[in-house]
Image (spheres, rainbow, N blue to C red):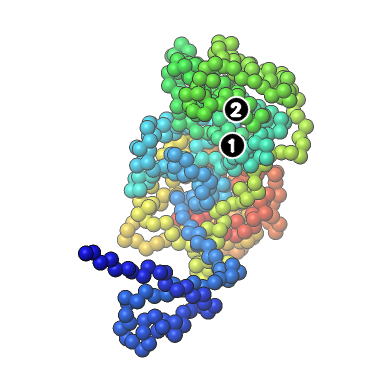
Amino acid sequence: MVVVEMVDLTAPPVRWLDGDEISVDEREEFYGEGDENPDWSVPPALFFQRLNSEEVIYQNNKKKCKFLGKYIMGDLLGEGSYGKVKEVLDSETLVRRAVKILKRRKLRRIPNGEQNVKREILLLKRLAHPNVIKLIEVIHNEEKQKMYLILDYCLGSLQDLLEVSPQKKFPIWQAHGYMLQLVEGLLYLHSQGIVHKDIKPGNLLITLDEKLKITDFGVAEAIDAFSPDDTCHTSQGSPVFQPPEVANGESFSGCKLDVWSSGVTLYNLATGKYPFEGDTVFLLFENIANGKFTVPEDVDPLLANLLRGMLEMNPADRLTVHQVKEHPWLKKKQYVVVRDKVSVPAERRKISVLPYIEEYLKGSDEDLSDDGCEVYQTCKQADLQFLRIEETGSGNVCSSALNIMSSGSKKEPFQLLFNNPNNYITPGSSGSAGYGSSTSHQKYSTMPSSSAAANGVRWNNGAEFGTNTHITSSSNPPTHSNNPDQGVGTRDPSWRRSLQYARKVTMCRQT
């Protein structure tokens, strides 16, 4: 005979409390009054406290200021399969840059990951064009097995703009302007014997002044100078942008592949759709191999003619980049700019580095004074010890950012350039202190003014600044062109605060 004992599985009582704490009476009710060793076998009550949303205080995490040589790290701009991209501020020129952070351990898990990164670095070192992303310098951290690529700062990609657009497309005049710049960039790449092989909206970045820059050369290929043609055999680009010859597994012309990908990109920018689609990669390639697509009826006839020429199934009949540039639609006069422009959200234009500098200086206010402040290096010595800068071929890279202190010596304060509040950094008239300068770092000898010398300003003769960067001393802030590429600059509303912080951070290195 089996005896089944019934166990009471009822849930413990639930009590709603208005106070902030559980009363002693409630505890003693379940664990025994005055009992120093309460009976823990008795299930305790579940206590819930009602909270008003107004009583909840959300505390933001403190922004910890981090340094990478002379660069101050900012917020995350994006993240992909290869690594992260963050905003940085050059503390010497006050120019916004972007850093691509790559982990070798992560690259080894990606097929051809390390080879693609090495290829991209080698190619970017030889390129210098307004419509091609510029590699400023490469920094290695051997201890952390990380690689940092310092690049031009961009607000986002065309894909980002398409996603925020209500109709998922650009006005025709805006697509026209971007296509003109894309063709100029492709003409330059092909003249250098380089085929990109992955042109798409996600790889076309936009700067603060609406300049388009081709990026992501991980799958690009340099054609041998002695090769009879531009025949390529492998393509790792995005499937929806691949031509029929790639879908059929054939060898292909690299330049004609870029024309096809640019045609798909233009189709997407102007219509918000793709000429070829498929639920799977196999169906997509099958549709691409057929080469049949339709252009919406509301598209400009000249644009429709250009799209058909760029998306010609037979590579021999497909337009070349030069023919695309000379096409009547692109030779057309600039479209009238209307109000339906798709713009980057305003929050993306803000400088994300400033909050980190503010948080860093909050704990140093007692040590910082207006007449002679000293800022100590906060980077870990172990981090700097393993940093080395790789030459990029774009001028002499500033090596003073990696001054290593001996382990037994005390921390030496950085010499500050700005003790006089009337001194401002202003880019030169040529604007080459911005993103597109071909020589990013040159020696520049500053000359102290009489007012600055009277105020005891210590000048670092021969300090390394951006090209044509100079120091002016006046009672009023300088005014110059509205080129937003000129660093933080006076065009940014936060310029005064930026310069104030710059006086206290690493503007000049140790003497």
In space, the residues marked 1 and 2 are separated at their CA atoms by 13 Å
Mark 2 — residue? 274
Q: Residue at x 54, y 33 (%)?
A: 203
Mark number, residue 159: 1
Q: Quadrant of the C terminus?
A: bottom left
Residue 397: where, in percent of width, then height? Answer: 47, 41
In this rendering, the answer to whether 214 lies above or below 143 is: above
As rendered, which of 296 and 498 lies closer to the eye?
Answer: 296
From what the image shows, is residue 216 above or below residue 458?
Answer: above
Q: Position of residue 200 (x, y in %)?
A: 56, 30
Query: In x, y percent, where is residue 145?
Result: 35, 45
- Work out whether mark 1 precedes mark 2 in sequence or the reverse, and give the earlier one: 1
What count of labels does the image hold?
A: 2
Res. 17 in view: yes
The part of the image, by quadrant, that contains residue 391 is top left
Mark 1 or mark 2, which is nearer to you?
2
Nearer to me, 102 or 386: 102
Q: Is residue 192 above or below residue 383?
A: above
Q: Amino acid at mark 1?
A: Gln
Contact check, label 1 and label 2, Cβ < 8 Å: no
Residue 254 visible in the displayed image: no
Image point (36%, 84%), residue name:
32
